[in-house]
Image (cartoon, helix red, strand yellow):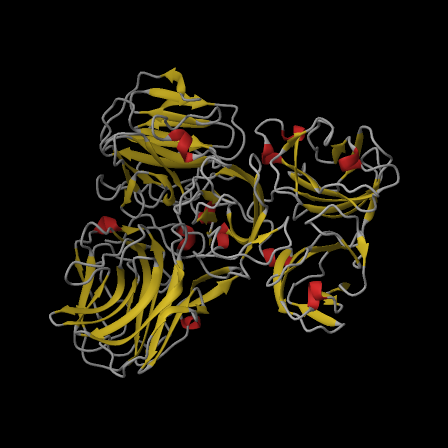
Amino acid sequence: MSKINASSFLNKGTQFIPSQSLRFEDGDSARLVRTFSNSSSTWTWSAWVKRGNLGSDMLLFGYFNGSPENFELIRFDSSDRFWWYQRTGSTGKGQRKTSAVFRDVSAWYHFVVKRSGTSLNMYVNGEELTTFDTSETIATDSYINEAFAHQIGERNDGNNEFDGYLANVTFIDGQALTPTSFGEYDGTLWKPKDVSGLTFGTNGFFLDFSDSSAIGDDISGNSNDWTANNLVATDVVLDAPLSGNNFATLNSLDKVGVSLSEGNLKSTATASSFQAVRSTITYPSGSWYVEVRSDAGIGNGNSIVGITRPSDALSTMTGSNIVGTSSTAWSYASNGNIYNSNAVDTATGTTWSAGAIIGVAFDGSSVKFYKNNSLIHTESSLTGDYVLTLGSYSTDAMTANFGQDSSFAGNETPQGNTDDGGVGDFYYTPPSGFLALTTGNLPPATITAPDEYFNTVLWAGNNTTGHAITGVNFQSDWTWIKLRNGASGHRLVDSVRGVTKYLDSTGTSAETTNTDRVTSFDSDGFTLGNSATVNGSFNYVAWNWLAGGTAVSNTSGTITSQVSANTDAGFSIVGWTSPGSGSNTIGHGLSSPPEMIITKTRTASIAYNWNTYHVGTHPTSPQSYFVALNSTAARGSSSTAWDNTAPTASVFSVNSTATVGASGDAMIAYCFHSVPQYSKCGVYTGNGSTDGTFVHCGFRPAWVMVKSYDNTRSWTIFDNKRTPINEMDGHIHASSSVAEQTGTDEIDFLSNGFKFRSGDADSNYSNFNYIFLAFAESPFRNANAR
């Protein structure tokens, strides 16, 4: 029989666009096997992949014979690089191993490999992979597509077990096709398309896993069916790459200690201390329901289901602490207690142990905990962002169901209940109005094309006046330029001050007017003069933001300001003339309170810092602190910088010459607030590890700037154009004129946030607290894995 309750909004009337996938567990020796007939050395393989566990060799597709060791394999290596490799005995026949690593577990990848004799090409998400750590000459003969037993998910000797999900696995015999035969763009999302019109060839097949009672069925028309080993009906789940059908899982990039299995839905403790893991999707606005089954709860409070803030450091809820440490976190433990602030808030008396199903219903202002569909506790008056968090101890284990599998990996009989939209597969019917945590249920992004509001461009200088830089996609209102391969200050220009007036974020100097730097803002970029700081014999980067064009007068504050505001993007440029010291308010033109404000005196005879407000510098009173963009210094305490008053939806407050300026001084401010799925002003705590802190953004980043606010460290900037592949290793310091740096501050940009891959003090030192500002490449709802 087919998997029950495939989401109705995903029914396309054809089995060539899947709404299901096959889950592989790397501890089960799970694989599909089929013996081919002898055919062509020209072929194309395509598959959609969602990863589970990382860090080991994992077979996706290929042929392996252990005696002699002849093989041709498409797989991940133990460093999470994508790898095609062929060998005969001890003789290499060719290989391609990418420089990029693929360790995003929150969304779907699409991989394609095409071969025609000695020509081989590899693709991910529609783009060709061209940078390889290893690239060898390819022999003429191909083992794939010859008369051998081929495998999917594991070699026939039990090694290279894949962990994760596969969907839309396709093989074309006799043609070398490009990714456009299998996928297409829907905005920023590369998604599957109907492949029923393709010619599959003699050995060709298409596996959509639509029938859980016949997992290996080929529906191409060739009847090239595969034999399933250690794969059962409950391994077919609703998680799939179709737009909107990407379900939350537990996040192997955001955990301490636990071991994850069953497609990152099962969490098992590994030591006699508290360990924790969070989900890949943070609860957005709306009402959400999740189920968690206790697989080995021992009833003394060691198994814990709760909600925490994404910015809460995992170190505060592990070791001797529990999930529910912070004042804003709430959890339901197996001893029946509700925990908050690391203490018992309510003793419900309702314990739970192995076999219990705990429901969590969260609606933004309250959380309800259920045991076996009976309401146990309600906690109200919640505000802010939350994420599902599981805590466990010793060998306790729990399996989550976000709506993709009500069997809990085969431990229960599936019940097939859906949410209010007809989506999902739950054991119990979710409360009225509550939804499955899947991308299709996420609120639509207000900005679906982020590169029309923020974009990075690169160029090589040519020492020529009139050098036009294009590719920005809009006429910028704020452009920030840095020479990459040499020492030089930063050049910040904007439409409010005028394009020929620049400020330098590395110092305190007043504004300078030059006609040999940026000479005009253009419809798709800007034009440069011949200054070596922007257009010499070097390489350059510019970060560009769209505000509101020509500034308009704003009288919301006690000081009239000139404002260019983009309320959709949560960004404005604010200029004003200072009346001198004293309490003042300034209209910023946005519709929500700014969470970050970068200020600078433009014309002061006295040098002032780039004093900056950020909502993350203090959990309750950020208006009492400032950091300087031009400095490595930790936050400073001041009751006058922001007049000890938090920004409002119309104004921000200032009360010192550092932020107001002396009488008659011209001032400028750049104001930001978070916009869901487009931008984020946030905070995180470093852990000092190469398995660094994961920071949830709700989007795939294009640009991130971080700063330790409680220690002396640099402002550090990353973007997706200078280092377009993970692991990213190229950062620029906003407060320094030094060239672009490599070798420290490694980072992965991911489909829903970023994760540090070094313990460098500028970005991820243990127990240092950091603020950040980030902008999106793609909203998570429409993001592929990176």
Q: Is residue 695 visible?
A: yes
Picture layout, residue 73 above or below residue 315: below
Question: Which is more toward the observer, 13 or 55?
Answer: 55
Question: Which is more toward the observer, 396 or 613?
Answer: 613
Would residue 222 be found to the left or right of residue 256 on screen? left
Q: Is residue 431 visible?
A: no
Q: Residue at x 19, y 80 (%)?
A: 38
Picture layout, residue 568 above or below residue 149: above
Would residue 427 be found to the left or right of residue 674 on screen? left
The number of numbered discs placed on residues in the rendered structure image is 0
Residue 76 position within the rendered picture, expressed as x and y whole percent measured from the top left: 31, 61
Would residue 704 be found to the left or right of residue 461 on screen? left
Residue 613 position within the rendered picture, expressed as x and y whole percent measured from the top left: 67, 37
Residue 743 position within the rendered picture, expressed as x and y whole percent measured from the top left: 47, 55
Question: Which is more toward the observer, 273 or 783?
Answer: 273
User: Given the current orientation, which residue lies at the most extreme left position?
Assistant: 67
Q: Quadrant of the C terminus?
A: bottom left
Residue 694 position within the rendered picture, expressed as x and y whole percent measured from the top left: 44, 44
| Residue 195 occupies quadrant | bottom left
Q: Residue at x 71, y 48 (%)?
A: 507
Question: Which is more toward the observer, 769 or 631?
Answer: 631
